[in-house]
């Protein structure tokens, strides 16, 4: 799992730098060369989508997503475990719906093109959602079966 996590994280970092390059190119084109191109905007947006949805499974595998645990930590251990499993089941349902919806949108938007890059098909922007939700499901389920370790790490993290 660690190797898969590192591979996905490396891909997200590459897309972060690609997005930075596109934004820099847009600034250079617009303000220095006085020529406005729209393709860097579209590519920066596409790279942003890739970066966000590739980091989703990485954050899930490390249990580092944003969460508020003030009330959660006040409950007894057994109730926390039940609540954790309920939230995990709901989250897997949401990720499954995201995956299915992205797959459907990808298949139905194969003829729609981006405005400034007619060779770039709009359905490409749904690929990272599918990848992120499938890997996110994998990591959420993997983490759910390590519940004792996850709960112990959470207690250690929030007790000072």
Image (spheres, rainbow, N blue to C red):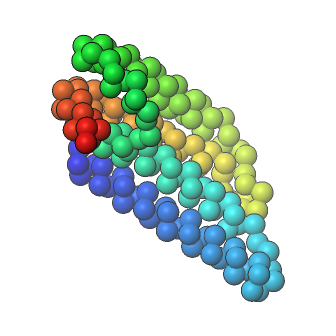
Q: Position of residue 154 (x, y in %)?
A: 27, 35
| Looking at the image, residue 142 lies above or below residue 113 | above
Q: Position of residue 123 (x, y in %)?
A: 62, 45
| Looking at the image, residue 51 lies above or below residue 40 | above
Q: Is residue 1 left or right of residue 110?
A: left
Q: Position of residue 146 (x, y in %)?
A: 20, 29
Quadrant for the C terminus, please. Answer: top left
Which of 136/124 is in front?
A: 136
| Looking at the image, residue 27 lies above or below residue 87 | below
Q: Residue at x 24, y 29 (%)?
A: 151
Q: Residue at x 80, y 80 (%)?
A: 35
Q: Can residue 44 be seen here?
A: yes
| Looking at the image, residue 30 lies above or below residue 69 | below
Q: Residue at x 58, y 29 (%)?
A: 101
Which of 20/119 is in front?
A: 20
Q: Can residue 57 be seen here?
A: no
Quadrant for the N terminus, please. Answer: top left
Q: Position of residue 125 (x, y in %)?
A: 60, 48
Q: How many marks?
A: 0
- Residue 31 sits in quarter: bottom right
Q: Residue at x 49, y 39 (%)?
A: 130
Q: Is residue 127 left or right of residue 65?
A: right
- Residue 39 sits in quarter: bottom right
Spot the residue most to the front. Answer: 160
Q: Is residue 78 left or right of residue 24?
A: left
Spot the residue most to the bottom. Answer: 33
Q: Is residue 17 left or right of residue 135?
A: right
């Amino acid at each position: 799992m660690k190797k898969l996590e590192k591979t996905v994280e490396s891909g997200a970092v590459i897309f972060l730098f690609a997005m930075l390059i596109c934004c820099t190119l847009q600034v250079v084109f617009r303000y220095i060369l006085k020529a406005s191109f729209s393709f860097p905007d579209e590519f920066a947006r596409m790279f942003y989508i890739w970066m966000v949805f590739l980091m989703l499974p990485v954050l899930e595998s490390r249990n580092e997503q944003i969460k508020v645990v003030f009330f959660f930590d006040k409950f007894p251990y057994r109730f926390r475990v039940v609540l954790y499993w309920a939230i995990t089941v709901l989250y897997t349902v949401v990720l499954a719906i995201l995956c299915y919806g992205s797959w459907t949108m990808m298949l139905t938007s194969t003829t729609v093109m981006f405005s400034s890059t007619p060779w770039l098909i709009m359905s490409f922007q749904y690929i990272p959602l599918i990848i992120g939700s499938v890997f996110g499901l994998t990591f959420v389920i993997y983490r759910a079966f390590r519940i004792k370790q996850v709960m112990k790490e959470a207690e250690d993290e929030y007790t000072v």
